[in-house]
Protein backbone atom coordinates (compact mmCIF):
# COMPACT_ATOMS: atom_id res chain seq x y z
CA UNK A 1 0.00 0.00 0.00
CA UNK A 2 1.24 3.46 -0.88
CA UNK A 3 0.25 5.23 2.32
CA UNK A 4 2.13 8.40 1.37
CA UNK A 5 -0.25 8.95 -1.56
CA UNK A 6 -3.24 8.60 0.75
CA UNK A 7 -1.76 10.96 3.33
CA UNK A 8 -0.82 13.45 0.62
CA UNK A 9 -4.38 13.44 -0.71
CA UNK A 10 -5.72 13.82 2.83
CA UNK A 11 -3.55 16.93 3.25
CA UNK A 12 -4.73 18.35 -0.08
CA UNK A 13 -8.36 18.01 1.01
CA UNK A 14 -7.81 19.11 4.60
CA UNK A 15 -8.42 15.70 6.15
CA UNK A 16 -6.85 14.63 9.41
CA UNK A 17 -6.75 11.02 10.55
CA UNK A 18 -9.49 11.96 13.04
CA UNK A 19 -11.75 13.38 10.33
CA UNK A 20 -11.21 10.42 8.00
CA UNK A 21 -11.69 7.88 10.79
CA UNK A 22 -14.94 9.62 11.78
CA UNK A 23 -16.25 9.34 8.21
CA UNK A 24 -15.23 5.67 8.13
CA UNK A 25 -16.87 5.01 11.52
CA UNK A 26 -13.67 3.67 13.04
CA UNK A 27 -11.32 4.85 15.75
CA UNK A 28 -8.19 6.82 14.96
CA UNK A 29 -6.21 3.95 16.49
CA UNK A 30 -7.75 1.47 14.04
CA UNK A 31 -7.08 3.75 11.08
CA UNK A 32 -3.51 4.27 12.25
CA UNK A 33 -3.01 0.50 12.57
CA UNK A 34 -4.23 0.06 9.00
CA UNK A 35 -1.98 2.87 7.74
CA UNK A 36 1.00 1.25 9.46
CA UNK A 37 0.29 -2.23 8.10
CA UNK A 38 -0.68 -3.81 11.42
CA UNK A 39 -4.17 -4.43 10.04
CA UNK A 40 -5.66 -4.42 6.56
CA UNK A 41 -8.45 -2.38 5.00
CA UNK A 42 -11.62 -4.21 4.05
CA UNK A 43 -12.92 -3.85 0.51
CA UNK A 44 -15.73 -1.60 1.77
CA UNK A 45 -13.17 0.62 3.53
CA UNK A 46 -11.09 0.86 0.35
CA UNK A 47 -14.20 1.86 -1.60
CA UNK A 48 -15.18 4.43 1.04
CA UNK A 49 -11.70 5.98 1.17
CA UNK A 50 -11.60 6.09 -2.63
CA UNK A 51 -14.87 8.02 -2.68
CA UNK A 52 -14.08 10.30 0.27
CA UNK A 53 -10.63 11.26 -1.02
CA UNK A 54 -11.66 11.12 -4.69
CA UNK A 55 -8.76 8.83 -5.56
CA UNK A 56 -8.12 8.23 -9.26
CA UNK A 57 -5.97 5.12 -8.93
CA UNK A 58 -7.07 3.10 -5.88
CA UNK A 59 -5.75 -0.22 -7.20
CA UNK A 60 -2.23 1.18 -7.52
CA UNK A 61 -2.49 2.84 -4.10
CA UNK A 62 -4.03 0.04 -2.05
CA UNK A 63 -2.81 -2.99 -3.97
CA UNK A 64 0.55 -1.86 -5.33
CA UNK A 65 2.20 -5.23 -4.58
CA UNK A 66 -0.47 -7.15 -6.48
CA UNK A 67 -0.57 -4.61 -9.30
CA UNK A 68 3.21 -4.75 -9.67
CA UNK A 69 3.25 -8.58 -9.79
CA UNK A 70 0.51 -8.62 -12.44
CA UNK A 71 2.44 -6.16 -14.60
CA UNK A 72 5.62 -8.23 -14.27
CA UNK A 73 3.80 -11.38 -15.43
CA UNK A 74 2.48 -9.74 -18.61
Image: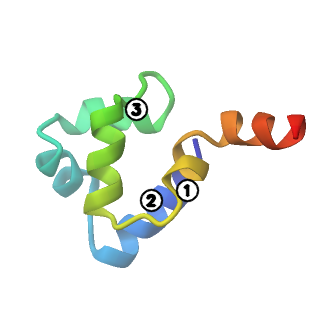
Quarter holding the C terminus is top right
Q: Which mark is residue 7?
A: 2
Q: Residue at x 49, y 34 (%)?
A: 36
Q: Which residue is situated farthest in the front direction here?
A: 74
Q: Residue at x 77, y 36 (%)?
A: 70
Q: Position of residue 5 (x, y in %)?
A: 54, 60
Residues at marks 2 and 1 touching, judged by CB atoms closer than 8 Å: yes
Q: Secondary structure at mark 1?
A: helix
Q: Which mark is residue 34?
A: 3
Q: Secondary structure at mark 2?
A: helix
Q: Secondary structure at mark 3?
A: helix
Mark 3 or mark 1, earlier in chain: 1
Mark 3 nearby-residue class (10 Å; few <14, some 14–19, many ≥20)? some
Q: Pick whichever, 25 or 43, lies toward us.
A: 43
Rounded to the nearest angstrom, the CA distance separating label 2 from label 1 is 5 Å
Q: Is residue 6 above or below residue 43?
A: below
Q: Position of residue 45 (x, y in %)?
A: 29, 38
Amino acid sequence: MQINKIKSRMTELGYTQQKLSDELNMSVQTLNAKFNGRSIFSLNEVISITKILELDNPIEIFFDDISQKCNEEH
